[in-house]
């Protein structure tokens, strides 16, 4: 690879941004729906899974960022260099898993509950079309997503914390603390009767999940971290000028000075991802799960779709004021909508880049009009989602859980690939520490075993 100077590492505050986007990818799935659903039905003894899942994702995300920091290109280009036909797997697994319109279906149910709009399918279709429009006209994709996600996450965390303070009891938090070590009410780790599909889906969505983890390498480039400073950015659909971008990155010379500077980069982006993604993400899961447990655990009907969310909104309105119940459901919609927008933005990047790489032979510059490819992938997924909705598949928790299980297997695949990629392409001095390798191996085994158990249970 071509070598250039490694930029100086910035301060911690200047690095904040990419992890907000990444956290936003999980708000409408694991945080808002899947973990609170499990808490409403089985209690808080399953919270250990959220802690383990988001910790696994923190480590795997940082290994994805490690590659992009050093090489200034996405990990998909790295996988392509290993074997050209990995691109086929990433195109189809991303399209199928994330094209399922679970977020739009759930968002339309919430809007119908709040405003009584009536036709759930029509609203879900309208939400998909609106998302496509917003992503098509934003000046730069990264900036559009960062502003949206930051606003919702900051407001949502403050409002949910207020609800938890007003409505939960000390005994709820005692149950939550025991749940972090796997002790539930009458069970250890997994309650009797729990569906492996539901648990694995929530586990995979303790964070973004699936191939979306790999999109973290895009945000390193967009923010200009490390060697990502030299990477070109995707322009909007209606921007002027040359839209061809070079996919192949550049690296830095492996010498003592650069290794020292890289350690500074590594420290500061680990802090950014830890505080924004791991800490804020885990806090959100716990707050929403404890609130769900406190308000609706044991109530009739909590196992039906996302009915538990409507029940929470109604009880919040009764116990505090109707306006609080209204804002809770509205916030839920905004979380789902921002997740839908973030997912479509990330998956369209993944699909378009891999599609181009599939037909690109070795040798010559890796230049492509990713803007055109991005929007073709974006609207292709929107059309697919609309088709699924019009065929009658519109129960949101089922769609989200099915997508999450597919994504859990995708994580099993890309965990192994990322580990092999870094081992093969990075200098020995810049590879992960032994303890990180151990956690990656444990995560790889965990996702593999639970994917097998879920498939086995599903075939019975």
Image: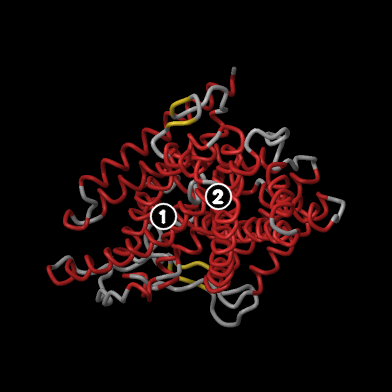
Question: In the figure, 36 relative to 274: above or below?
Answer: above
Residue drawn 67% across and 55% down?
A: 380
Of mark 1 and mark 2, the one earlier in the sequence is 2
Residue 112 or residue 459, whichever sits in front: 112
Q: State the colouring used for the structure image.
A: secondary structure
Residue drawn 63% across and 64% down?
A: 375
Q: Position of residue 25 (x, y in %)?
A: 54, 56
For the residues marked 1 and 2, what is the alpha-carbon distance in whole angstroms?
A: 12 Å
163 displayed left or right of 124? left
Quadrant the C terminus occupies:
top right
Residue drawn 66% across and 45% down?
A: 100
Residue drawn 26% across and 77% down?
A: 8
Reading the image, the residue beneath label 1 is 278
Q: Residues within 10 Å of mark 2 (few under 14, many from 20)?
A: many
Question: In the figure, 296 relative to 91: above or below?
Answer: above
The number of numbered discs placed on residues in the rendered structure image is 2
Question: In the figure, 303 relative to 22: above or below?
Answer: above
- Residue at the outermost right position: 118
Residue 57 or residue 358, whichever sits in front: 57
Q: Please tell me whether mark 1 sits on a helix, a strand or a loop.
A: helix
337 displayed left or right of 119? left
389 displayed left or right of 361? right
Question: In the figure, 138 relative to 345: above or below?
Answer: below
Reading the image, the residue beneath label 2 is 31
Query: Tag on residue 367?
Result: none
Q: Position of residue 210 (x, y in %)?
A: 50, 46
Q: Position of residue 67 (x, y in %)?
A: 32, 58
Location of residue 376 (image quadrant): bottom right
Q: Residues within 10 Å of mark 1 (few under 14, many from 20)?
A: many
Q: Please tell me whether mark 2 sits on a helix, a strand or a loop.
A: helix
Residue 52 or residue 409, whichever sits in front: 52
Determine contact: label 1, label 2, CB under 8 Å: no
């Amino acid at each position: 690879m071509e070598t250039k100077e490694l930029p100086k590492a910035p301060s911690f505050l200047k690095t904040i941004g990419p992890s907000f986007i990444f956290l936003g990818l999980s708000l409408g799935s694991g945080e808002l729906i899947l973990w609170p659903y499990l808490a409403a039905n089985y209690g808080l003894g399953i919270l250990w899974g959220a802690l383990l899942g988001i910790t696994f994702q923190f480590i795997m995300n940082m290994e994805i960022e490690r590659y992009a920091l050093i090489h200034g290109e996405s990990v998909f280009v790295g996988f392509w260099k290993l074997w050209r036909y990995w691109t086929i797997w990433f195109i189809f697994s991303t399209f199928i898993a994330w094209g399922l319109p679970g977020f739009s279906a759930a968002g339309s149910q919430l809007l119908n509950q709040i405003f009584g709009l009536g036709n759930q399918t029509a609203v879900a279709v309208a939400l998909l079309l609106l998302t496509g429009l917003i992503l098509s006209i934003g000046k730069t994709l990264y900036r559009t997503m960062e502003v949206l996600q930051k606003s919702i996450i900051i407001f949502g965390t403050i409002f949910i914390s207020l609800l938890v303070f007003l409505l939960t009891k000390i005994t709820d938090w005692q149950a939550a603390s025991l749940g972090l070590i796997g002790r539930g009410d009458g069970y250890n780790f997994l309650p009797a009767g729990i569906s492996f599909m539901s648990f694995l889906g929530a586990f995979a969505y303790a964070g973004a999940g699936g191939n979306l983890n790999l999109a973290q390498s895009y945000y390193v480039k967009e923010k200009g971290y490390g060697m990502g400073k030299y990477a070109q950015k995707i322009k909007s659909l209606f921007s002027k000028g040359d839209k061809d971008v070079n996919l192949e990155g550049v690296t830095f010379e492996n010498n003592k000075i650069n290794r020292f500077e890289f350690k500074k980069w590594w420290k500061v982006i680990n802090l950014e991802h830890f505080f924004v993604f791991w800490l804020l993400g885990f806090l959100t899961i716990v707050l929403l799960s404890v609130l769900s447990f406190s308000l609706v655990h044991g109530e009739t009907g909590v196992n039906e779709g996302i009915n538990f969310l409507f029940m929470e909104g109604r009880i919040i309105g009764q116990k505090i004021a109707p306006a609080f119940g209204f804002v809770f459901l509205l916030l839920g919609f905004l979380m789902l909508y921002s997740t839908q927008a973030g997912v479509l933005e990330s998956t369209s990047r993944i699909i378009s880049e891999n599609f181009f790489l599939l037909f690109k032979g070795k040798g010559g510059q890796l230049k492509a009009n990713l803007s055109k490819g991005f929007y073709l992938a974006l609207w292709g997924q929107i059309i697919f989602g609309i088709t699924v909705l019009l065929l009658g598949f519109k129960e949101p928790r089922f769609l989200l859980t099915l997508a999450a299980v597919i994504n859990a297997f995708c994580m099993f695949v890309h965990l192994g690939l990322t580990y092999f990629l870094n081992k093969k392409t990075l200098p020995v001095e810049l590879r992960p520490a032994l303890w990180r390798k151990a956690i990656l191996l444990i995560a790889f085994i965990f996702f593999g075993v639970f994917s097998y158990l879920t498939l086995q249970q599903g075939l019975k």
